């Protein structure tokens, strides 16, 4: 069975600074996907960034980037130039590769509550 | 921008009562999901639904739970006889049709069982 661990329940960062959120996972699968989802207060979860395990290149989306270490089973999220709107709960999630109805089963970590301070 | 919408946002019910949580997925999506989060715990997968049938379900999704897509737009989760431990936030999600694709989540329905 797959597990996802986020070891930082809460973090804070000053506006414009950089912060890194940690995530480790455990799986025996070789082909899978990793995600970071963001959930602002009282809003729905939205996708921040996605990584395909077979791609060695780290995914980036504007100010968000990941450090994907497949051998170490580590998937950290770096937020550069933090903005007040980045304040949210961040969830790391794992999805094994599948087709048709056998996909979409996300395994989540417990989340990291990030506060961006002015 | 299209969104997944869920109703009600909060429901309080007595133990043993039936509850139906409703979701309207994004209209052209093909895969539908229910997740739940008990307070202080992880978000957990309950069930996936594709092509008008359950594709996969977790061990949480026992005989007390059922899902339905009655009219091609709504996607419902029914809990037949609620227990105290069913108190949680329930999230609906949908996905277009892409291997390893993005799930779009609703804001959640908070269920409180007394």
Image: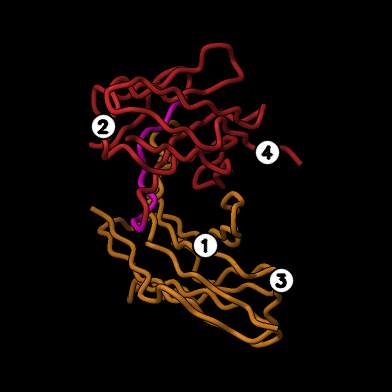
Chain colours: A orange, B red
Of labels 4 and 1, the one closer to you: 4
Position of residue A96 measured from the top left corner of the image (x, y, whole percent): 37, 50
Q: Earlier in the sequence, mark 1 or mark 3?
A: 1
Please say if the residues under marks 4 and 3 sit with CB atoms less than 8 Å apart. no
Q: Which mark is residue B3?
A: 4
Q: Is residue B68 above or below residue B90?
A: above
The residue at 55%/31% (across/down) is: B8
Of labels 2 and 1, the one closer to you: 2
Please say if the residues under marks 2 and 3 sit with CB atoms less than 8 Å apart. no
Q: Is residue B100 above or below residue A74?
A: above
Quarter of the figure with residue A53: bottom left
Q: Is residue A115 left or right of residue A103?
A: right
Q: Chain of mark 3?
A: A
Q: Which mark is residue A62?
A: 3
Q: Which mark is residue A3?
A: none
Q: Residue furthest right?
A: B1
Distance from the alpha carbon under mark 1 to that under mark 3: 14 Å
Distance from the alpha carbon under mark 2 to that under mark 3: 45 Å
Position of residue B80 measured from the top left corner of the image (x, y, whole percent): 31, 19
The residue at 67%/27% (across/down) is: B27
Q: Is residue B41 left or right of residue A47?
A: left
Q: Is residue A47 above or below residue B35?
A: below
The residue at 31%/37% (across/down) is: B86
Of labels 2 and 3, the one closer to you: 2
Whether labels 4 and 1 belong to a single chain: the reply is: no
Magenta residues span B40-49
Q: Which residue is mark 1?
A: A36
For label 4, the SS is loop
Q: Which residue is mark 2?
A: B83
The residue at 57%/35% (across/down) is: B97
């Amino acid at each position: 069975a797959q597990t996802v661990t986020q070891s930082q329940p809460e973090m804070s960062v000053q506006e414009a600074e950089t912060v890194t959120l940690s995530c480790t996972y455990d799986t025996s699968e070789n082909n899978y996907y990793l995600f970071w989802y963001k959930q602002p207060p009282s809003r729905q979860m939205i996708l921040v960034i996605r990584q395909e395990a077979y791609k060695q290149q780290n995914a980036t989306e504007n100010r968000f980037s990941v450090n994907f270490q497949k051998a170490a089973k580590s998937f950290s999220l770096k937020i550069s130039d933090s903005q007040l709107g980045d304040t949210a709960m961040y969830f790391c999630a794992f999805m094994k590769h599948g087709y048709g109805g056998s996909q979409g089963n996300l395994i989540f970590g417990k989340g990291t509550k990030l506060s961006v301070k002015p | 921008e299209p969104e997944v919408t869920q109703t009600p946002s909060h429901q309080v019910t007595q133990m043993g009562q039936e509850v139906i949580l409703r979701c309207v997925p994004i209209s052209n999506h093909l895969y539908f999901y229910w997740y739940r989060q008990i307070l202080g715990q992880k978000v957990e997968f309950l069930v996936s639904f594709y092509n008008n049938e359950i594709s996969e379900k977790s061990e949480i999704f026992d005989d007390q739970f059922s899902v339905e897509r009655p009219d091609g737009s709504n996607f419902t989760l029914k809990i037949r006889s609620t227990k105290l431990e069913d108190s949680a936030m329930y999230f609906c999600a949908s996905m277009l049709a892409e291997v390893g694709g993005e799930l779009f989540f609703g804001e959640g329905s908070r269920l409180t069982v007394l």
